[in-house]
Image (cartoon, grey):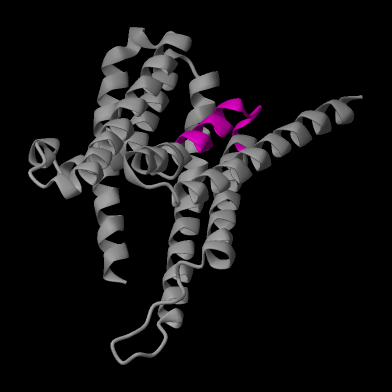
Amino acid sequence: MTEVAVVGPCRTYAAVVATAAVALGLLAFAADFVDGVAGQVMIALTSSGFAWGLAAFLAGRWAAGARRAAVGATGLLVLATLLYYVLVLVISRRWSGATLEDGTSADLYGLRSVAVMTAVWLIGSLVAGPMLGLLGHAVRVGDVSRAALAAGVACGLLSGEGWHAMAAAPLWQLLPVPDPDRADFVRGVVVSELVKILLPLAVLSGLATAHRLWRAWPMLLTAAVSSGALSALLWYVLAAAANSF
């Protein structure tokens, strides 16, 4: 009876993680085809560091043990990444059709770009997955101090992409928009930046309320600010590395 009781929840957890990964990959792929402000918002909600990081965090928070939290969160990100780039490779084929200055096909360069980005995000999944999974698990099972620290660090990591985007393109420089032809695009960027910053704060507030972490608010806020700054720096390095290829 004990073995059956353990195997059942394990299979249920694996099925939920796999379903979430497929949904995440499909939604991220679909967001690439939406234009305008709606497209920018959809990308922020489905194809951003916040969205994928939150999925991994929640997978860890729902897991029964620390090991399952790390494995489940990592598996979710790896599967979603593979599905997304398989869809790019086979269906959208964004990598094909371009030509070089001499008129020859640029498909090999496109394939190289897809391969490089797939490798980058897979490595990112292997690094971030265990971390976010364990943070999610710690929030659920840890004492107030440990849970507050984990929630603050998770919030900072989830908001890092938004802070990096804000530093690269401050809202006060984007608005008002003098060029009517770019207004829709700029509004999308502004909304996207706000979503990536405000939603992690909403997640932090929800976790603090659900787990009664406000008693440890100094640790909560210190961890969020510190990890947010570190995460923004890491996103800057990642963006610089991606632009170098």
Q: In which quarter of the view is residue 204 placed?
A: top left
Does residue 181 show up magenta in the picture?
no
Nearer to me, 160 or 84: 84
Q: Position of residue 134 (x, y in %)?
A: 51, 34
Point 54% across, 28% down: residue? 137
Residue at the (43%, 13%) spot, across then down: 144
- Quadrant containing the N terminus in the rendered view: top right
Q: Is residue 61 magenta?
A: yes
Q: Is residue 182 left or right of residue 59?
A: left
Height in image: 136 above or below 82?
A: above
Please report the bounds of the magenta region as a residue range: 54-67
Q: Quadrant of the C terminus?
A: bottom left
On screen, 83 above or below 191?
below
- Establish if 38 lies above or below 34: above
190 sits left or right of 82 in the view: left
Check the image and name the residue furthest to the front.
180
Q: Is residue 211 visible?
A: no
Q: Position of residue 104 (x, y in %)?
A: 39, 90
Which residue is painted at 26% across and 16% down in the image? 218
Tell me the chief SS of the magenta region. Answer: helix
